[in-house]
Image: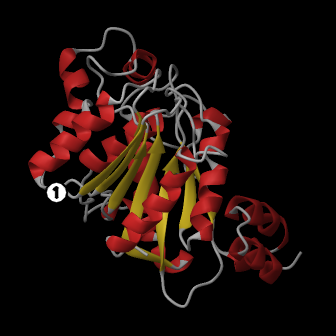
C-alpha cells in the first residue's frame, strides 16, 4: 500500500493508528510523525510499558472539507476501570458524519492508576489536537471533549481543571492550552460526594481518599465564568449515576453565567450511548448537532 493510499484511508474514516502501522513498515519517513501515543517517550507516572500503561488517541477523520473542521476528544465510560466500546469508535464515526474529527482517548485506568494520571491523559489529548491542528486540518479554536459516565467525569474535569500551557516547555505540545472549547457530557459522573458513583471514585482516587481531593474533583464545585459551554444529557431514572450529577453541574454553570443546554429523558438506562433504536434517547445526538450549530462550532 502506498503512502497516498494510506492517507485516503484516513480521510475515509479509518483510524490513523491503522494507517501509521502500514506506513511505518513501508514509508514512515514520507508519512511523517502521525502516531496515537500521547507521549511517544512514555507517559509521566507510567508504571510499566504494556498497553494499559500507554495512553493513546485514535483519530478518525471525516471527508475532506474546504475549511478547517472542529474536533472532539471522546472519553468512553467504564467506571475508571474499563472503556466501553459502544462509547468509543461508534461515537467518533457519528462525529465524522457531521463533519467533525473524532479522537477516541484511551486513558489510564484504576485501580492501577489514580488521579492525576487520568486528567493528565485527557489534558494531553486536547493539547495534542491543538498543537497538531494544522497537520490534521482542525480548527484549533473548535476543540471539544465528550464523555460518558466516568468518561463524563473526566471530560468535566478537563473542562474545569485546565491550564494555558507552559510557554517555556521544551515539548511544544505542552506549550498550548488544555482548555476544551466546549463539553458534551452524557449521563456524566460529576460529583464524588453524596450523589457520586462510589466505584468510579475508588478507582480514580483509591480507598479512603482525603476530603480535599474529593472536594477538588467534585466538579460542580469547580465551575467558574471561564468554564467552557456544556451540553448535558441524562436519564431521570438512571440507576447507575443519579441525575443529580447533571442537575448540580447545570446549576453551577447557570450561577457562573456559562452557556449550557440540559436534556433530561424520563426513562434512560445508564449506558445508552448514542441511544440505539430507542425513539426518545436516539434524539440526543440530533439535539447536540443543533446546539453545536447555534454555538458556531459547525
- Identity of the residue drawn at 65% across and 74% down: 32
Q: Is residue 172 visible?
A: no
Is 208 displayed left or right of 272 in the figure? left
Foreground pick, 18 / 226? 226
Q: Quadrant of the C terminus?
A: bottom left
- Identity of the residue drawn at 42% across and 77% down: 139
Please determine whether, in this image, residue 284 is positioned above or below residue 76. Answer: below
Q: Quadrant of residue 65?
A: bottom right
Residue linked to disc 1: 226
Is 171 displayed left or right of 61 in the figure? left
- Secondary element type, mark 1: loop
Q: Quadrant of residue 154?
A: top left
Please determine whether, in this image, residue 194 is positioned above or below residue 92. Answer: above
Find residue 161 and report its horizontal and vertical position in percent.
25, 45
Q: Quadrant of residue 62?
A: bottom right
Find residue 104 and report its horizontal and vertical position in percent.
57, 52
Q: Is residue 7 visible?
A: yes
Is 204 displayed left or right of 37 in the figure? left
Farthest residue in the top direction? 208
Farthest residue in the bottom direction? 66
Q: How is the image coloured?
A: secondary structure
- Identity of the residue drawn at 52% across and 40% down: 107
Find residue 273 and report its horizontal and vertical position in percent.
57, 42
Q: Quadrant of the N terminus?
A: bottom right
Find residue 270 and report its horizontal and vertical position in percent.
52, 30
Is 188 displayed left or right of 195 in the figure? right
Please determine whether, in this image, residue 226 is positioned above or below residue 28. Answer: above
Amino acid at each position: 500500500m502506498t503512502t497516498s493510499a494510506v492517507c485516503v484511508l484516513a480521510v475515509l474514516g479509518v483510524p490513523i493508528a491503522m494507517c501509521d502501522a502500514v506506513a511505518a513498515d513501508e514509508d514512515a519517513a514520507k508519512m511523517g510523525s502521525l502516531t496515537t501515543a500521547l507521549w511517544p517517550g512514555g507517559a509521566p507516572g507510567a508504571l510499566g510499558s504494556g498497553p494499559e500503561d500507554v495512553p493513546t488517541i485514535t483519530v478518525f477523520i471525516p471527508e475532506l472539507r474546504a475549511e478547517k473542521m472542529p474536533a472532539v476528544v471522546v472519553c468512553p465510560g467504564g467506571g475508571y476501570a474499563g472503556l466501553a466500546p459502544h462509547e468509543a469508535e461508534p461515537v467518533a464515526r457519528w462525529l465524522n458524519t457531521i463533519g467533525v474529527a473524532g479522537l477516541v482517548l484511551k486513558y489510564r485506568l484504576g485501580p492501577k492508576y489514580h488521579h492525576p494520571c487520568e486528567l493528565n491523559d485527557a489534558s494531553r489529548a486536547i493539547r495534542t489536537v491543538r498543537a497538531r491542528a494544522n497537520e490534521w486540518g482542525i480548527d484549533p479554536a473548535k476543540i471539544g471533549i465528550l464523555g460518558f459516565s466516568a468518561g463524563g467525569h473526566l471530560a468535566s474535569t478537563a473542562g474545569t481543571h485546565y491550564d494555558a500551557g507552559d510557554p517555556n516547555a521544551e515539548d511544544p505540545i505542552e506549550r498550548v492550552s488544555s482548555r476544551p472549547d466546549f463539553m458534551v457530557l452524557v449521563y456524566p459522573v460529576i460529583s464524588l460526594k453524596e450523589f457520586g458513583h462510589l466505584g468510579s471514585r475508588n478507582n480514580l482516587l483509591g480507598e479512603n481518599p482525603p476530603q480535599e481531593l474529593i472536594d477538588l474533583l467534585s466538579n460542580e464545585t469547580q465551575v467558574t465564568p471561564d468554564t467552557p459551554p456544556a451540553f448535558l444529557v441524562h436519564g431521570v431514572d438512571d440507576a447507575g449515576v443519579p441525575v443529580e450529577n447533571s442537575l448540580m453541574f447545570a446549576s453551577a454553570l447557570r450561577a457562573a453565567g456559562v452557556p449550557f443546554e440540559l436534556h433530561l429523558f424520563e426513562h434512560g438506562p445508564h449506558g445508552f450511548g448514542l441511544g440505539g433504536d430507542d425513539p426518545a434517547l436516539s434524539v440526543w445526538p440530533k439535539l447536540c448537532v443543533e446546539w453545536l450549530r447555534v454555538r458556531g462550532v459547525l
